[in-house]
C-alpha cells in the first residue's frame, strides 16, 4: 500500500500501489482538496505527479497545479511527458472520469505498458458529480473513496465515508488481523453513533438512553479524531498540517474505542494529528 499518513484514508480505504483510486463526490465535498493534498505528500516522497486535464476548464484544479510535474490536455501529451522522464520513480497520475468513460485512458495505459515507464497509481476524480448517482462508477477500481454529504455539512474533513469507501487492501488476505478488528469495531461504533445522532438532532441528548450515552460520546470523539488538518490548507485554516502513520492511527482508534479518551474534551480531539 501507499501510506499517505492521512488517518481516515489509511485506516478505512488505503491506496494499493500501482492500482486505481476512484473519488466519488458532489461539488463542495472536498475531493479536489484531498487530491491536492495527496499530490503534495506524494511529490515530497519522490513520486512524479501527472495531471490529465478535463476537456473543460475548472477553476478548482488551479491549486493542484502547484504540485504537478507533468500536465497536459490530451492523452498524447501525457504519454510524451511520461516517456521523456529521465529519473526512475513511481508515478501518481490523476485524470477526470470522463477520460475513462471515453476509453482514452485504456489506450494511454496500453501505450505506456509497451514503453519503459515507471509503475503508475491512478486517481480518477469526477468534477461532474455524476458518479455519485451510479452503483459502480469506477468498475473494478482497487480503491473507492465515497465522499459524505453528512460529514461535509458538519465541516468534518476529509469527508470520506467510513462505510461506503472500499479498498482491496482491506481484504483479509492483505490486511493484518489487528487492523481488521479495530476497523470493524470503529465502523460499528460510528454506525451506532449516527443512529443516535439523528435522535439528538431532533430532540436533544435527553432522547438517548443512559445505557447508550457512552456510545454516542465515543462516536463523537472518534469522528472528531478522524478529522485532520492538511498542509495545502494551512493558508486558509491557520492550522498546521499533520501526518500520522497507520500504526499510530490504529492504536489511537483503539484507545477511543476502549474508552481511554472518554474524559477528553471533544474539541481537543478535532483537527489534530495523533493523540
Image (spheres, rainbow, N blue to C red):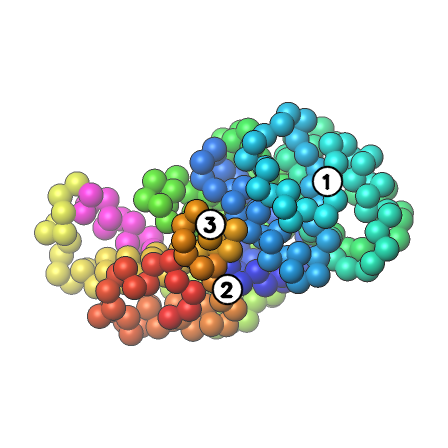
Residue 235 badge: 3
Tag 3: Cα neighbours inside 10 Å, few (<14), some, or many (≥20)? few
Task: Give residue 179's position: percent from left, percent from top.
Answer: 49, 69
Residue 253 location, quadrant? bottom left
Residue at 52% from the left image edge and 45% from the top image edge: 33
Residue where numbered disc 2 is placed: 243
Q: Nearer the viewer, residue 135 or 100?
A: 100
Residue at 84% from the left image edge and 51% from the top image edge: 85
| As drawn, 19 above or below 185 | above
- The residue stretch that appears in magenta: 189-201
Task: Give residue 192's position: percent from left, percent from top.
Answer: 29, 54
Q: CA distance from mark 3 to mark 1?
A: 24 Å
Residue where numbered disc 1 is placed: 71
Q: Secondary structure at mark 1?
A: strand
Residue 92 badge: none
Of the two numbered discs 3 and 1 in the rendering, the one whose residue sits closer to the viewer: 3
Q: Secondary structure at mark 3?
A: helix
Can residue 266 be seen in this snapshot? Answer: yes
Amino acid at each position: 500500500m501507499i501510506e499517505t499518513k492521512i488517518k481516515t484514508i489509511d485506516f478505512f480505504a488505503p491506496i494499493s500501489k500501482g492500482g486505481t483510486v476512484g473519488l466519488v463526490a458532489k461539488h463542495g465535498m472536498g475531493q479536489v482538496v484531498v487530491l491536492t493534498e495527496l499530490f503534495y505528500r506524494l511529490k515530497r516522497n519522490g513520486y512524479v505527479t501527472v495531471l490529465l486535464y478535463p476537456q473543460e476548464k475548472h477553476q478548482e484544479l488551479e491549486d493542484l497545479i502547484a504540485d504537478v510535474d507533468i500536465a497536459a490536455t490530451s492523452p498524447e501529451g501525457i504519454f510524451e511527458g511520461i516517456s521523456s522522464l529521465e529519473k526512475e520513480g513511481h508515478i501518481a497520475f490523476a485524470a477526470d472520469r470522463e477520460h475513462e468513460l471515453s476509453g482514452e485512458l485504456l489506450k494511454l495505459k496500453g501505450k505506456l505498458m509497451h514503453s519503459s515507464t515507471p509503475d503508475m497509481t491512478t486517481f480518477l476524480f469526477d468534477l461532474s458529480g455524476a458518479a455519485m448517482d451510479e452503483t459502480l462508477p469506477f468498475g473494478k477500481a482497487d480503491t473507492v473513496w465515497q465522499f459524505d454529504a453528512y460529514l461535509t455539512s458538519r465541516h468534518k474533513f476529509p469527508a470520506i465515508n467510513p462505510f461506503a469507501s472500499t479498498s482491496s487492501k482491506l481484504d483479509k488476505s492483505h490486511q493484518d488481523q489487528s487492523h481488521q478488528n479495530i476497523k470493524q469495531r470503529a465502523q460499528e461504533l460510528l454506525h451506532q453513533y449516527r443512529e443516535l445522532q439523528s435522535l439528538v438532532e431532533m430532540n436533544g441528548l435527553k432522547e438517548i438512553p443512559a445505557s447508550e450515552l457512552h456510545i454516542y460520546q465515543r462516536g463523537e470523539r472518534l469522528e472528531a479524531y478522524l478529522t485532520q488538518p492538511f498542509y495545502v490548507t494551512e493558508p486558509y485554516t491557520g492550522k498546521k498540517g499533520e501526518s500520522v502513520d497507520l500504526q499510530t492511527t490504529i492504536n489511537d482508534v483503539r484507545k477511543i474505542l476502549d474508552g481511554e479518551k472518554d474524559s477528553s474534551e471533544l474539541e481537543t480531539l478535532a483537527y489534530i494529528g495523533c493523540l
